[in-house]
Amino acid sequence: MIYEVSIWAVIFFVFFVGLVLALSFYFGSKTKSASGYFAAGGNIHWGVNGIAFAGDYLSAASFLGICGMIAFAGYDGFLYSIGFLAGWVVALFIVAEPLKRMGKYTFADALDAKFNSKGIKLMASISTLVVSIFYLIPQMVGAGDLVVPLLGLPHWIGVIIVGSVVILIVATAGMTSTTYVQFIKGGLLIIFSTLITFFILNKGLDNPPRPDYIAPCSIEVEMKDGQMDFHNLEEYDYLSEVAVGKYLFVKLLHSGTERWYKVDSADDNSICLSETLSKTVLASGDVLYNGQPKSERMFYQVGHMSRIMEDGEEIESTGPVGPLGFLKRIEQSEMVLFKKSYFNDGAEKVTVWYQETRQGKDVMKPGLVFKVGKEASFWDKLNFASLMLALFLGTAALPHILIRYYTVRSQRAARKSTIVAIAAIGFFYILTMYMGFGAMINGVLDMESSNMSAPLLAKSFGVFIFSIVSAIAFSTVLGTVSGLIVASSGAIAHDFFDKYLNRKMNDKAKVRAGKLAAFGVGIAAILLGILFKGMNVSFLVGLAFAVAASANLPAIVMIIFWDKTTSKGIVASIFVGIVSAIVIILLSPSMFEQFRLPRESALMPFDNPGIISIPLSFITLVVVSLLTQKKKQALTP
């Protein structure tokens, strides 16, 4: 997709980045101690901390990923919102106060509060790094996606810009500046998402969504002796066809341009071919979009309704609607979704996006991505249950969320911060449903990146709001990545060098080590963000939640509620949780697809590892703790 660069977008982008850097330099001049760098000195007000929690948590996955997934797959995308929000219940009732009581700078402090074990320090620092890097990948992917329409730059340059700015933020002032960046962007994100939702409801539902909208066409081809006969369609010439599973794609030459069509229906007399959007990588390495070079702008945005229904009558538009009326008409109408398929045509690698008409009532319930009904296989149901389990348990195990409990003065303030965060996050997730469905029907979808659905929806309401929303989305990535890199640098400087290697560093040396660690983690995040371009960020964050829940949550829960927990049990639990989760992810169908291997050849039949790796980690902790009880008792006075 080629985007027009707006000067206003550039101005707002530069303004926000400048504001963030100014905050960093200001607080950097005041940060002198390790406590100030890693935990903001424990002096953040609980109200500010609560919104900063929301700002940290409402990452690229929430704003870009969930809205994009709803726009492409309906209600199944909203399940991520439900899972992300439900996870805060675990954080509020189980983790918040004990973590504040037991920890100091990092969550390893809490795990090791009873043991003073080098093994726990090492495994906790490794776990923090692994989980943070898994969580960093979607943030960097989302950042690259944002910069493409905002500044007209390639994806990889966007990733480098974000990585560089964040490294500068964290290396300058650590947790204090990170907190205020998250507070500002969290508040602005909620305000402007509310404004976008107002615009969606005020516009209502239209078919077509705008006067200049280009909907993919369909053509009817007669059959003669079992072959397609184009004598009535002289402007079309048959070139080739490729079968992919149950679908058949046909390549035709039309007005000198090669285009791909999908066979939608067929009988003995005729077949119906619907036009697809396509991307073809030629043997020479050149890339064609809808049969033309990208500069010809033939690869247009899509997203429309097949029929708008109101109380059994088909209409062209609804006019302004209320929140409930919008959802009711979506449910009554017919939607056009776009699905993706890959195949090779000789030496050419082809990706097509084809239309699929769905009843609104099907789009408004689970099932288009996550199969849970009668048609679902055992592995489909297991994959869905595994995802929900990881989302529910993962929040309370994310290192960059856990360290925010150390930025307030008391356990009571930690609990109050969590309640503020839940209220802000819950309200925002309701808005994602309207923004996602709004993007689905308003002709703004970029087939190459579902992550851009919400910003491009904002653009359809004017360059001004697009500019502000894109700048806020960019700062969303900055805030979350900053928190992740602070957590990672704390794990390296405080847990590994100071505690595990026993370097006995003073505050100044700890801060210096933390800043150097921020550089290393930031560079790793940049490389991974470029490598995983194109994947939906909510899906990637779901994997990060699974790794966090598998590695950290069993240790956190058991050390709080089970007196027989031993240090060796915690070490073994973290190790098994990390390894089992990552192995399952690497062997999953989505990872095979990312590297253009057939999904069917994946060694694991499902994507989400939590339903196996989380219980396995719990069981490991219990078994190893019971086997090491004698040594524990002998050491206890």
Image (tube, rainbow, N blue to C red):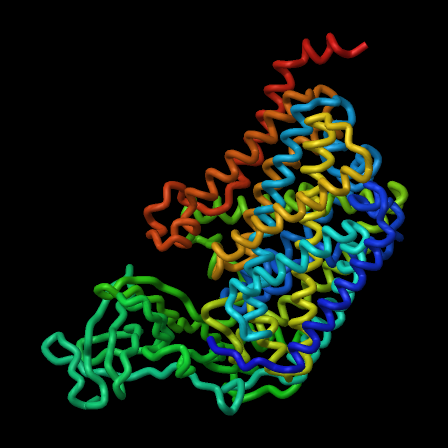
Picture coordinates of residue 349 (x, y %)? 30, 64
Q: Quadrant of residue 205?
A: bottom right
Q: Quadrant of residue 214?
A: bottom left
Q: Total of numbered circles in the picture?
A: 0
Left or right: residue 140 compared with residue 57: left
Picture coordinates of residue 365 (x, y %)? 54, 62
Picture coordinates of residue 565 (x, y %)? 69, 22
Task: Say which of 455 and 152 sits in front.
Answer: 152
Q: Name the residue located 68 percent from the left edge and 44 percent from the top edge.
A: 516
Q: Name the residue located 24 percent from the left edge and 82 percent from the top edge.
A: 253
Left or right: residue 111 compared with residue 387: right
Q: Quadrant of the C terminus?
A: top right
Q: Residue furthest left?
A: 225
- Where 293 sits versus 590, above or below? below
Task: Say which of 316 and 130 sits in front.
Answer: 130
- Where 235 sits versus 374, above or below? below
Q: Is residue 260 visible?
A: yes
Q: Name the residue located 74 percent from the left edge and 57 percent from the top edge.
A: 54
Left or right: residue 169 compared with residue 434: right
Task: Say which of 95 and 185 sits in front.
Answer: 185
Q: Name the residue located 59 percent from the left edge and 37 percent from the top edge.
A: 550
Q: Is residue 367 visible?
A: no
Left or right: residue 267 compared with residue 425: left
- Where 43 sits versus 308, above or below? above
Picture coordinates of residue 475 (x, y %)? 69, 64
- Where 276 sits versus 568, above or below? below
Q: Quadrant of residue 243?
A: bottom left
Task: Say which of 304 and 146 sits in front.
Answer: 146
